[in-house]
Every structure is written in structure tokens, then in C-alpha cells.
Image (tube, grey):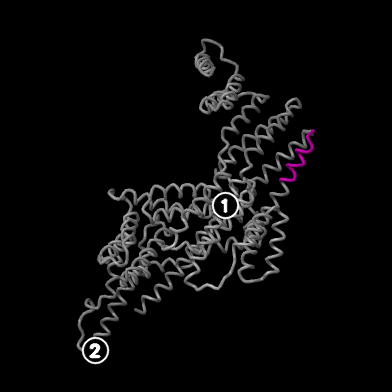
Amino acid sequence: AYDLIKGATVVGGSGRTPRIDPEWCVLCAEAGLQLGCVEISTACLKMYFEGNPPANQFLCRAYLCQGQLKSPPATGSVEDFEEAVMYFLKAIETSKREPRHHFMVFNASVLYFQTVHPLLQPGRSLHLVPSLRQVVQSLEEVADQDHSWRAELMMQVTVRVVNCINYVLSGICRVAFLLELALLALQVKHQKVAADCLKELKSSGEAVMTEVLCCHCYRRDSQSVAAVPQARLKEIGKLDQWLQTAVREGGPQAVQAVCATQWNFCLPLLQHNLRNRIKTPLLRVAQALEEMQSMLLELRCQVHSELAVTEEEEGRLEASLTHLRKAMLLDNGTQQERLSSAFHLLQLRQTLYQTPSRLQDKAAMLMQQARDMPPQDKTDFRPILVDVGLLLAPDDFQMVLDADDTSKSGLGSGPVAQLAAKAQHHSASVQRVEGHMARQRSDADHTEMCVLWATLAKTARKHEVWDVCRAACRFCLLYDDGRWQKSDSKMMNDLKSNSKITEILGESCGSQSFVRLLRLLAEIHFISAEVCSC
């Protein structure tokens, strides 16, 4: 059928025979969509829209078909969902013009709601409020007789607005918060608070899991500090068994509750020498949440991110890249910069025998080689680290590094003159740093450079190359000039001026990267104070 339509369209375009009715393109596209022939359906709709069709029932059906073709998976971005929603709204607006097409408004509303269902969660549902309101208003305008459906959509509008407000104020779901509070109360022996939390959890359908958590999760025996990791690993093993039981029983709330609790138990063990012991439980958490298409996207993103680090430490780069890809798909934007950077570095590690074109990539590869070597290795790390500094600051790094080289300060006639010469040499070398920012290229990525200098400082500290560490700290702290606080202050001003929730949340996602940079700079300040006293 598609070949006949295509052939007739081509021949008709040459003027020798009449063109085929455009409605056949829509019918073929609908059939292709039902049969899973996406390419045929897409091609038919393209031919239909190129003919400037009239605003009739077939145009509405074409918009609905296009909206279904554009529907992304559950982990798709908000922009992908908005593109699909646009076609459903076009179908609704077109159907409203003719009373005989009003039934299409209901059909479009059902397809719209099925498509946007993955966005019905705190943090993402705010993007649905405008379109959801438009759908409800359109159903009212055409006086749709399915009052229960209209009422359900109205409730969804109300719930989405409330969820947006709750997301801004708290940032976490109620069940997860109550679980965490109950565990914390049991830990510090506030039995009444724990009992109140567990009572609320039971009333929300979490009775089985709360009993499990009460009986087993925080049994506090007298244990030494050295035995705490072993005790925690034992509890993690029990939670792993309960997760498998919950998966077999098919209770989504129970599965999510155990996964959230398991993640909280694993957090303190996400250290270099312990994370490999919790790899299997975290893999099971990720698999369980993925199979049920859980809406706990932030938790799933964090789990995959940590699994990527674990796989990288074990040398399984392909598995690490797979977890990072999943984490980037699940991310709501707050971790985009960090995940993209980690993904890029892993790709560089896979091409060890190729020389990157960017100086920053060359520096990152050299640093990764130094970081992979154990501190006990007798290899001289200093030449590698110096090469990294020279790549990042070709004109300035060596001069700043020479500030600690007293042999280049010249000779004096006495102790005082020698000290004066050393001080003068040190000042002249360090002053070179002050003009470094002015000599940077205008298109330089300051965020990337700041992170690279910080990584060099921490790597040099790890291998006790103190002069390189001091120089790297000086360059890194040049970026601590207040630039990272601009977005936060602007966000606070918007909050005070009652800006839209979408704008506030959009900027808060960007401000998360600035918060991480501020923490990194604070860490470098501590390292700088430490190495300057050496």
C-alpha cells in the first residue's frame, strides 16, 4: 500500500495523472503505527503534511499519529515529551473548530495522558501543568460527556501543582522521607518518633516493609568501630534478600522502599576500599528499579553513577560507560555536567594509543595515568605532573614552579642578602600567576580548567609532590573570584520577586554544578594551607 501511495504521489507530482487522495496517507500511517512500521508511518505523514492538507478529521488523526510517533521512552528528556505534546494539542485545537469533530478531543486527551505519564513525578510534573490545563479546558469547551475523565484530569492538574510546590520545598517524596526519618530515629533511640513514622508508613500501604525494617535494619548491638562496616555489610545482605522477595511478590511500593533503604545503607561504604563489596547489591537495586520502570529517577541515576565508578576502578571501562549512559538518561539536569565530564574521560581512557587534539584532554589523560598508579609505586611521578601543568599553563607554570627552587635565587654576600634574594625570587615567580587569567583565551572553559587544576593539586598531594601541588593550588584558586555565586544570588532574587516555579527550578539545576565547584574550591583551600606549611 505504501509503495502504491508513494508511486502515485510521484507520478501525480509530474502532472501526468491525478494525485492520490491525501487521506490515504493518513490511513497508511495509522496502519503502519499499529504494525510497528515506524519508517513507513513517518514517510506517509511527511507526504501528507507536504500537501498542505485542509483542517478536517484526517488532519486531526495525522496529528495524533505524529504525536504517538514522537512519544519518547520513559527516560526521555522533557524536550522530547514537549515535542510529542505539541502534536496532541494541535489535534485538540483543530478538532474544536467543528462540532462533528469534538469526539476527537476526547481521543486526543487519552493519548496525551498515556504519553506524558512518565512525567507524573515531582520535579518533572511542573512541565505538564500548562498543557494539562489546556486539555482540561478544551474538554470543557466541547462539553465532553465523560465527566469522570474530566474530573480525573482536573485532579491531575491540582496534584501536579501541589507536587511542584512540595518538590521545591522538600525535594524528596513523603514515603522516602518517612523511611529515612524512622531509621534515623531508631539509630539515635528516639522510639516515639520512630513509632509515629512507622504508623504513617503502615497507613500508606508499607506495612510489610516497615515491619521488616523495624525488626532487622537497625539492631544496635555493642560493637567496636572496626566492626561497623562488617555489621553494615551483614544488614545489606539481608536487605538484598528482602529485595529479591519483594520482586518475586510483585509489590512496587515494597521494592522501592527496600531499594531506598539499601541505598542509604550503602552510602557510607562508597569508598575506594569498600565499594567493590556492595557492587552486587547495587546492581540488583538498579535492575529491580529498571524492570519496574520506577519513577525514582534521581535514585536510579545515583546508583548507576556509583556503579560506573566501581566498574572503572575494576578496569571494566565498557561496563562503566554503560552505567554512565543510563545515568545521563535518568538525570534531570542537575548532574549533567559531572556525568558528561566522567563519560568524556572514560572515552579518552579507551583510546590510550591515540593522541587527543585538545590540550585539556592530553592533560586529563596524563593525570589519569598518574592517578591509576598506587602511591607505593616507586615511579617518579613528578615529570608526569609537571607535564600536566605545562599543558594547562604553558607560559606560566614553570615560572611559578621555580618559586620553590632556591637554587635559582642568586647568591648573596651574607645570610640576610641570601634570604632577601630568595624572597625576591619567590615573589617574582608567584606574581606570574596574577596575570594568568588575563592571558587565557576568551573561549576557554573556566569550569573545566578549574576542575583540571584541582585534580592536579589532589593528585600531586596523593603522591607527595609538594612543589607541583603548591603551584597547582595557586592556579586553581585564581578561579575563586566570586564568579560561581552569580547564579545562586540571581536565583534568590527571583525567589524574592515571586518568579515562576519553572524558572526557579531551571536555574536551581544549573546552580548544583556551582555548588560542587564551591566545595571543590574549599577543598583546594585546605590543601593549599596544608602544603604551604610543609
Residue 418 lies in quadrant: bottom left
Q: Residue furthest top?
A: 16
Residue 398 at what x, y percent from top left? 27, 67
Region of the chain picked out in magenta, as a range: 145-156
Q: Nearer the viewer, residue 425 or 344?
A: 344
Height in image: 65 above or below 304?
A: above
Can the viewer see residue 167? no
Residue 130 at what x, y percent from top left? 67, 45
**Are there few (<14), some (14-19), or many (20+) residues within 10 Å of tag 1?**
many
Q: Is residue 150 in the magenta section? A: yes
Q: Nearer the viewer, residue 298 or 367?
A: 298
User: What mark, if any, has residue 1 been given in the picture?
Assistant: none
Q: Amino acid at mark 1?
A: Leu
**Quadrant in which the N terminus is drawn:** top right
Residue 53 lies in quadrant: top right
Q: Is residue 369 in the magenta section? A: no
**Quadrant in which the C terminus is drawn:** bottom left
Which residue is depicted at the point 41% across and 48% down?
A: 319
Height in image: 493 above or below 208?
A: below
User: In the image, 318: left or right of 134?
Assistant: left
Q: Which residue is denoted by mark 2 in the rendering?
A: 415
Residue 182 at what x, y percent from top left? 65, 64
Can the viewer see residue 321? yes
Which residue is depicted at the point 46% across and 47% down?
A: 325
Q: Amino acid at mark 2?
A: Pro
Which residue is depicted at the point 67% across and 54% down?
A: 206
Residue 164 at what x, y percent from top left? 66, 53
Q: Which residue is denoted by mark 1 in the rendering?
A: 243
User: In the image, 5: left or right of 466?
Assistant: right
**Are there few (<14), some (14-19), or many (20+) residues within 10 Å of tag 2?**
few
Q: Main secondary structure of the magenta part?
A: helix
